[in-house]
């Protein structure tokens, strides 16, 4: 399971790097990605540092490393979008890579 957590941390780093490269990077509009742990999933949460606003970016299944698009704050959408065991995908901070 620690491998999946490490891959999820790597995903968060890739998302932050992508935002720094392509996002609206004014100091008042920066974003970080944090991991919240649940029973079944790691929840990847985007936090706007200037306002404290939070939204779910994705879910990662703790036992398998499967990456899911968020359906709501509490649950993933049906159907895995990617397997993190294959490496971190080419990500974009807005989540476009999670759509089919």
Image: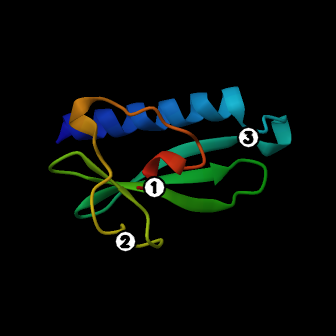
Disc 1 designates what residue? 99
Residue furthest toward the front? 100
Depth-wise, is mark 1 or mark 3 nearer the camera?
Answer: 1
Q: Where does the image place residue 13, in percent across and percent down from the top left?
A: 49, 31
Disc 2 designates what residue? 75
Lower position in the chain sequence, tag 2 or tag 1: 2
Location of the N terminus (image quadrant):
top left
At label 1, counting other C-alpha atoms closer than 10 Å, the crowd grade (few under 14, some 14-19, many 20 or more) is few
Disc 3 designates what residue? 30
Q: Residue at x 27, y 38 (%)?
A: 84
Depth-wise, is mark 2 or mark 1 nearer the camera?
Answer: 1
Instruction: Kindly identify which numbered label has been placed on residue 58.
Output: none
Q: Are marks 3 and 2 in contact (CB under 8 Å)?
A: no
Q: Secondary structure at mark 1?
A: loop
Above or below: residue 21 compared with residue 12: above
Q: Residue at x 31, y 34 (%)?
A: 7
Q: Residue at x 51, y 54 (%)?
A: 45
Nearest to the observer: residue 75 or residue 6: 75
Q: Where does the image place residue 51, in percent across and percent down from the top left?
A: 77, 56
Judge from the rendering whether residue 90 lies leftward or rightward of residue 19; answer left or right: left
């Amino acid at each position: 399971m620690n491998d999946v957590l490490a891959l999820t941390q790597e995903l968060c780093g890739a998302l932050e790097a992508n935002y720094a490269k392509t996002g609206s990077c004014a100091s008042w509009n920066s974003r970080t990605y944090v991991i919240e742990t649940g029973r079944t999933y790691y929840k990847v949460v985007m936090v706007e540092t200037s306002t404290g606003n939070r939204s779910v970016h994705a879910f990662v299944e703790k036992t398998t490393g499967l990456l899911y698009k968020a359906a709501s704050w509490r649950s993933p959408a049906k159907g895995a979008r990617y397997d993190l065991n294959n490496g971190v995908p080419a990500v974009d901070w807005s989540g476009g890579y999670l759509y089919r």
